[in-house]
Amino acid sequence: MEKKLAIIATKGSLDWAYPPFILASTAAALGYETQIFFTFYGLQLLKKKLALEVTPLGNPGMPMPLGMDKWFPVLGLALPGMQAMMTSMMKSKMKAKGVASLEELRSLCLEAEVKMIACQMTVDLFDMNRSHFIDDVEYAGAAAFFEFAGESDICLYI
Amino acid sequence: MEKKLAIIATKGSLDWAYPPFILASTAAALGYETQIFFTFYGLQLLKKKLALEVTPLGNPGMPMPLGMDKWFPVLGLALPGMQAMMTSMMKSKMKAKGVASLEELRSLCLEAEVKMIACQMTVDLFDMNRSHFIDDVEYAGAAAFFEFAGESDICLYI
Amino acid sequence: MEKKLAIIATKGSLDWAYPPFILASTAAALGYETQIFFTFYGLQLLKKKLALEVTPLGNPGMPMPLGMDKWFPVLGLALPGMQAMMTSMMKSKMKAKGVASLEELRSLCLEAEVKMIACQMTVDLFDMNRSHFIDDVEYAGAAAFFEFAGESDICLYI
């Protein structure tokens, strides 16, 4: 019988946007039936126009290029412009290394019939506008998601 | 047979306090037997008097109200008072939208017989005082939790 | 039949390095066959010389010793030296409380035959050098990890 992967995607930064789409597309390629439930900040991943950013603030695990952390100790990481710079560096690096963009990975997931569900409660909470989201999204609550998750072989909270 | 949900709750901020309680109460309402193992910063969620805060620092995925991020670029987010302000805004918003408070969600879980377990090792590590925690808590180690988690249908690390 | 635990370790800070190793060694002691897939910042946990740090920035859930947060409100937490100080305090505390060091926990996992897999894609992406990692590591992609995860009793994304 077909295996099932259920993902709860809760983060909305550039770096943490990759895992749900990479894991879902990989699983789908392996024949898994896959659903992603986007909730909290994860709803940012469903926007038509993705404008995600990454920050080194609060993440001492991030490898800093060119010894940047020596030149800009922690306080420097909070300087205006640093977040935009890290975002741009991460995007260039991904591209140079041949990693698909988030938009491409998301399309890949949709082509592979990964079902994407937006958490209706969070949409209401943040006053988000459905017209800002891509079309291939269903809107439902956590209870609906449990139907699938409860039968899944792997369920990940990301 | 009754389905089982096991949750490991490790975060102690206001925003990340919701997912364990929302998921646990939803699952319990659907008939799941549910246990939450509170460890690391997650122990903050068991305090009688919840004083959790939320910060936009290090989380570029947070939707900022009123274009606040335009007025206060990253460095501004670190200003004293910003964390208190975001915390107060999030609480008002939750209330205005009819989302139950954390205390209410936690009570709901307890009424639905969600079992709450505090990680004894972390309690010792942080020199936490059992008298600060709510009464309906058991104290155990990770090994005890695995007994339940190993039989669960869904196990989430939050 | 032997139970199976699959862990995806994605974080690279000192505090979040403990959960994968504590959970894996506990599970192994209980007879679980265990695999950890290290990806994104989690690859830092495989370095021969662990130089992980912890920061209170962006984590209002962290219990601050000695009311430090009263003396240094949020902006103060970004001061140069604060991250090093918190890192050193956390290490001393762990040691004083008899918690094994990360290096010890990692060795314990290896002795208990926990299989450690480094995500080849991330190694390439961050231009990491295999010679910096411990020897007992296999290199593979997410697809390979799914073979084990899909058969696991517990699968955690940390």
Image (spheres, coloured by chain):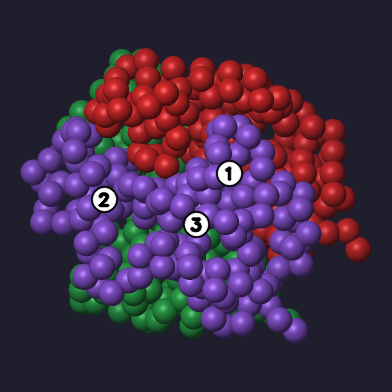
Chain colours: A green, B purple, C red
User: Residue at the location (73% across, 35% down)?
Assistant: C137
**In the image, residue A55 above or below residue C156:** above
**In the image, residue C126 above or below residue C50:** below
For marks 1 and 2 on the same chain, the one whose residue lies earlier in the sequence: 2
On the image, numbered disc 2 is attached to which residue?
B87
**Chain for mark 2?**
B
Q: Furthest residue to the left? A: B71
Q: Which mark is residue B130?
A: 1
**Mark toward the viewer: 3 or 1:** 1
Q: Nearer the viewer, residue A46 or A59?
A: A59
User: Residue at the location (78% across, 36% down)?
Assistant: C109
Task: Indicate left or right for A63 with A46 as reference.
Answer: right
Q: Label 1: how many residues lie within 10 Å, few (<14), some (14-19) or many (20+)?
A: some
**In the image, residue A135 above or below residue C121:** below
Q: Nearer the viewer, residue C122 or C151?
A: C151
Q: CA distance from mark 1 to mark 2?
A: 26 Å
As shown in the figure, which amino acid type bears the numbered disc 3? Ile
Q: Nearer the viewer, residue A20 or A129?
A: A129
On the image, numbered disc 3 is attached to which residue?
A158
- Could you say where residue A103 lies in the image, as x and y percent from the top left? 35, 61
Q: Nearer the viewer, residue A78 or B151?
A: B151
- Could you say where residue C8 lies in the image, as x and y percent from the top left? 62, 49
One can see residue C153 in this view: no
